[in-house]
Image: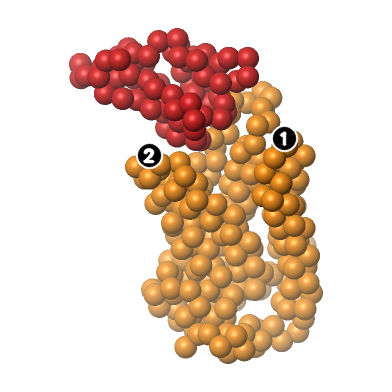
């Protein structure tokens, strides 16, 4: 497969809308105020499509998927 | 039942139907966008589903908008050129009121392009352009009321009232759910949500619902010093 991808949350931009946790519950949980917490930054190959959808769904563009390992 | 004005060819019907459907879809898109932008959490439906619905409805809006514009330009009755599709206020037919629709189309195209490129632009620049959609909706509504040949039909008036009610209700619902802060923005939203129905009602009563609107609509641009 291609190079691994790593999730990153822009804490300044994030307003805790919570769409990412709905689309990628395997890797993203929400804290008690609704802000995302990454359970695992590395995206496994089987979740790549779901991660891409979660990144695209963020209304604040605060979720990023970077190339490479953390 | 309402008696439809049975004149004109298929293109003219397609253009009118396309325009009306575009208004309904745009209204649904804008109302969803307003209602889902706040902090309120919907019950029974995911936030991502509302986000996807907002996106898909907006794309469907543009499809019907394309049908509306292409059929209007191709229709031999009004003799519009292709430039009318993107350059506002230059049309030979009801220049001001058709120009509002063209301006709305330009704004929606800007919203489309910036949304497609939002990852490159960044959230600030993308949102700055995205707010133009709030301007596009009243422009589309006044374009419908001023240009639409169906404006006098009771069903069409009920449709406009429904569109207006949906967006105004969405604004008030969002304001009711909003937390503290951003007072200027909320005041502007409240004033706009009150002003648009009042202005549209006054415009309909004095303009399209009075006899002789067709002649006056054709001459409006001269009064404002625009047009050709």
Residue shown at 65% from the left, 88% from the top? B215
Residue B156: image location, x then y, percent: 71, 63
Foreground: B160 or B135?
Answer: B135
Residue A1, how many percent across, how many down?
20, 16
Q: Is disc 2 in contact with disc 1, using a CB cutoff of under 8 Å?
A: no
- Which residue: 73% across, 67% down? B200
| Residue B189 in the figure: left or right of residue A15 | right
> With respect to residue B33, does B41 lie above or below?
above
Q: Which residue is mark 2?
A: B119
Report whether residue B14 is seen: no
Judge left or right: residue B49 versus residue B207: left
Q: Nearer the viewer, residue B8 or B128?
A: B128
Residue drawn at (77%, 78%) of the image: B206
The chain that appears orange in the image is B
Q: Is residue B114 above or below residue B200?
A: above
Chain identifier for the red-coloured part of the image: A
Tell me the quadrant of the picture where the N terminus of chain B can be found: bottom right
The residue beneath circle 1 is B179
Give the camera-side residue of A21 and B150: A21
Label 2 secondary element: helix
Mark 2 residue crowding within 10 angstroms, few (<14) / some (14–19) / many (20+): some
Q: Chain of mark 1?
A: B
Q: Is residue B73 left or right of residue B44?
A: left
Q: In the figure, B39 relative to B199: above or below?
A: above
Q: Indicate which label's residue lies in the foreground, 2 or 1.
A: 1
Residue closer to the observer: B135 or B102 = B135
Same-subunit check for callouts 2 and 1 = yes
- Name which of mark 2 and mark 1 comes first in the sequence: 2
Location of residue B154 by image quarter: bottom right
């Amino acid at each position: 497969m291609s190079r691994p991808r790593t999730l990153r949350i822009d804490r300044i931009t994030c307003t805790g809308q919570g769409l990412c946790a709905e689309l990628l519950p395997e890797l993203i949980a929400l804290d008690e105020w609704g802000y995302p917490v990454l359970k695992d930054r590395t995206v496994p190959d089987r979740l790549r499509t779901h991660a891409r959808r979660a990144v695209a769904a963020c209304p604040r563009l605060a979720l990023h998927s970077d190339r490479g390992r953390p | 039942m309402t008696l439809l004005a049975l004149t004109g060819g298929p293109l003219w019907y397609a253009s009118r139907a396309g325009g009306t459907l575009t208004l309904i879809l745009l209204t649904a898109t804008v109302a969803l966008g307003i209602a889902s932008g706040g902090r309120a959490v919907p019950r029974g439906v995911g936030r991502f589903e509302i986000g996807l619905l907002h996106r898909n409805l907006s794309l469907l809006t543009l499809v019907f908008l394309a049908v509306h514009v292409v059929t209007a330009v191709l229709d031999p009755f009004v003799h519009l050129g292709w430039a009318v599709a993107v350059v506002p206020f230059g049309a030979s037919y009801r220049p001001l009121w058709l120009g509002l629709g063209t301006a709305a189309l330009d704004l929606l195209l800007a919203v489309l392009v910036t949304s497609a490129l939002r990852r490159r632009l960044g959230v600030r620049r993308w949102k700055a352009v995205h707010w133009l959609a709030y301007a596009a909706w009243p422009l589309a509504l006044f374009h419908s009321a001023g240009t639409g040949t169906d404006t006098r039909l009771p069903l069409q008036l009920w449709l406009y009232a429904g569109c207006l009610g949906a967006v105004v209700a969405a604004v008030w619902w969002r304001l009711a759910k909003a937390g503290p802060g951003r007072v200027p923005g909320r005041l502007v939203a409240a004033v706009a949500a009150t002003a648009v129905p009042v202005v549209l009602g006054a415009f309909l009563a004095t303009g399209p619902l009075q006899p002789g609107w067709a002649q006056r609509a054709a001459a409006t641009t001269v009064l404002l010093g625009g047009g050709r």
